[in-house]
Structure formats: structure tokens, C-alpha cells
DNA sequence: GATAATTGTTATAGATCATATCAAATAGCC
DNA sequence: GGCTATTTGATATGATCTATAACAATTATC
């Protein structure tokens, strides 16, 4: 515990009959108010849901969204080192070490010392890694993204993707 | 460290001259490939950027997005207890305790034992809490959301919000 | 009145994210 | 060549966020 526990303040409110707000006794849904208009709030809520569905769709392969993104990037950029892969994914190098440990211990990718620069590790997918990625891509396309396209409509989905890219880029 | 460190596998690759992929020697940007087409990935990247901007815009008040959402909900729903506020925000009750501790220790809200149900704590903003929320709302509207509207255009922003709501709801 | 359920809370574990630091290797400069 | 600075992967560590179990006090249910 960091924040010191503060004693509960007993409201020294003057006497009142038929309490005005405290009981509420309503039970109805709470008002979200301006919260629904906050883009950041909606973004986070949507992201959590989408990740949840991704995790569910790809569960048979035991891949998290982050792990999937690593495999995908390794496939598209063979022969890169850890720093390059990590930074383009927005992962800090120290945190990328354990991620790679997990993938490598499952035989999905390999670290190899570069002959040019013996500091760096060349990263490459194994055959098993490529096979797993292929199966994951299929699951994502047919189950996950398919559901998104169905829910939003293909045109809206494309528009959404475009706006998200704008936010991630220009903001 | 949880995952056992696995030894680096020295590729037992047969001899090769003029290495085909390892050196790369490119230096160019990495290919994102199908990653840019993944809605979840774009969602997360956009959400991080938007939160970062929110934090910056509202920095003078020292409010995180989560804290702002709590104040907003308390203002719109005075007299509710911790469980109600926490669950509608998707916060687990145990984790909400420390959040409230922080807000209450800053004098922004107050816990009061309910007279009806002496188990629960009625939550209410203090005057200082209302004032802080008002200032925060103004900063968010004029700096944060204004920038988003300018970047996307008001119509696109509304469409984006609508789609995000759909994802958070129906998914 | 006995049992079950709820509320706020604590403790705790895991995951995510960030910083400082290190040894090995390389680059750059004189 | 040799010295310094930088880079790379790695470790240690801390902060934050998330998730579960359990507990005392209180209320609900039968």
C-alpha cells in the first residue's frame, strides 16, 4: 500500500428528513453522462473487447495479441535483431527479452548471433513458428476479423481502421 | 523471471557464402505487413496515443483518465456506493479502494456510511471535487477533444465514436 | 434465529510498463 | 594501434494495472 489510508469522513451534514439523494432506492442503470462522448474512454473499452475476442478466437494456439504481432513482424522481416523488432512494436528492449524467451522456448523462433555484429541476435521464425503463424492468421481472419467486418460492415471497418491509423500517426 | 532462460541456439546451418538474409544491411523501415490491417492492433496504438494526449492536456490538474472518469460518474450519479461506481466503470471492487483513497485524500470526494445499508459507502464529490472536475472538463473539451475533432473532422469523429460504442457493446 | 449473500477491505499474485545498469562487442577518433 | 563512446542483449528492479481469495461487518432470506 502506497497511499495512506484516510479515515472515513462522516458527513457532518445537518439533520434532514426524507433524504434527498442518499437512498436513491432507484436501482436503475447509472448515467454515463459525458463519459460516452469521451473518445479515449470509448477507445479503451472497445480495445479491451476486441482483445478479449482475439484471445478467444486464437485460444487453441495459445497466442496473445502481442505474441501474434511479434510472429507476424518476424515473418515479414526475417533477419532483424531484437532492438529493431521490439522498437517497431513499441516494446522496450528489456521487456522484449522475456517475450522472446517464451516464444523461443516454444520453438516458434530462434535467436542467432549475427556474424557481422556479434552483439546482436538475428531473429527468425522456425518452421513450427511459420506453421503456427499460418494457423493463427487463418483463425484471426475467419473468426476474429470476420466478426468485426460483419458487425461494422466492410466499408465502416475500413473507415475505422483509417481513422485509428490517423490517430496513431498524427496525434 | 518465470520462463527458464533457454540457451541460444547456434544455427547449425550448412556453410553459405554471401549470406542471403542475415546481414540485411538495409536499415530501412520494417514492414508492418498484415499488422496494419489488424483492428485490435490499431485500436491499441490509437488508444495509447489518445490517453497520452489526455494526460498531457489535463496535467495541470494531475488527473489520469481513470480518475477523470470516476469524478465524472460521481457527478452524474451522486449518492451511489463503491460497488456501483466501480462496476459501471469496469473496475474491480478491490482495485477501486486505492483509487478512492487517492481521490479522497486529495479532498475531491467523500465516503459516507449509508444510513440504509451500513455496509456501503455513499460516494459524493466535494466542492473541490466539483471545481476540479469543471476545470478538467474544460481542458478536455478545449484542448484534448478539440484536437481530435480537428484531426478527424467532426463528422468522422462522431462516426468513430459510434463504431467504438458498437464494438464495446455488441462484441 | 440460523444461514446465505453483499459491501468494503486486505493481501496477494500476475501482467504490463519503465528505468538504471552491466558485459560484450563495435564504432569513431586521435 | 589504442582509447573512448556507443550499441546490443540482458538483468534487476520498481511502478502500475489487473485479477482472485478471503475476512469482518452488515443485511437478506428462509
Image (tube, coloured by chain):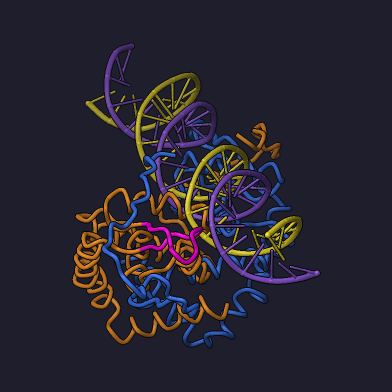
Chain colours: A orange, B blue, C purple, D yellow
What span is in magenta? A111-123
**Residue B90 in picture, x, y percent from top left:** 43, 52
Look at the image and tell me whether residue B163 can be seen: yes
In the picture shown, does residue A113 fall above or below A3?
A: below
* Magenta segment includes A113: yes
- Residue drawn where x is 66% and y is 43% of the image: B104
Which is nearer the eye, A150 or B7? B7
| Quarter of the view holding residue A108 | bottom left
Which is nearer the eye, A54 or B131? A54
| Quarter of the view holding residue A111 | bottom left
Which is nearer the eye, D9 or A129? D9
**Residue B168 in picture, x, y percent from top left:** 37, 65
Q: How many marks?
A: 0
- Residue drawn where x is 51% and y is 75% of the image: A168
* Magenta segment includes A97: no
In the picture shown, does residue B20 fall above or below A69?
A: below
- Left or right: B4, with B156 as reference point: left
Amino acid at each position: 500500500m502506497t497511499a495512506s489510508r484516510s479515515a472515513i469522513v462522516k458527513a457532518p451534514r445537518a439533520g434532514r428528513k426524507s433524504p434527498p439523494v442518499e437512498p436513491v432506492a432507484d436501482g436503475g442503470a447509472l448515467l454515463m453522462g459525458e463519459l460516452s462522448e469521451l473518445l479515449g474512454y470509448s477507445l479503451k473499452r472497445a480495445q479491451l473487447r476486441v482483445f478479449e475476442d482475439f484471445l478467444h478466437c486464437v485460444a487453441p494456439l495459445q497466442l496473445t495479441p502481442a505474441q501474434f504481432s511479434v510472429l507476424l513482424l518476424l515473418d515479414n522481416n526475417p533477419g532483424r535483431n531484437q532492438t529493431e523488432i521490439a522498437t517497431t512494436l513499441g516494446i522496450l528492449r528489456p521487456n522484449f527479452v522475456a517475450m522472446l524467451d517464451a516464444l523461443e522456448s516454444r520453438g516458434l523462433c530462434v535467436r542467432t548471433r549475427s556474424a557481422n555484429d556479434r552483439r546482436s541476435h538475428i531473429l527468425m521464425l522456425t518452421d513450427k513458428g511459420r506453421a503456427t503463424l499460418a494457423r493463427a492468421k487463418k483463425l484471426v481472419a475467419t473468426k476474429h476479423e470476420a466478426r468485426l467486418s460483419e458487425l461494422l460492415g466492410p466499408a465502416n471497418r475500413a473507415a475505422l481502421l483509417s481513422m485509428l491509423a490517423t490517430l496513431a500517426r498524427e496525434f
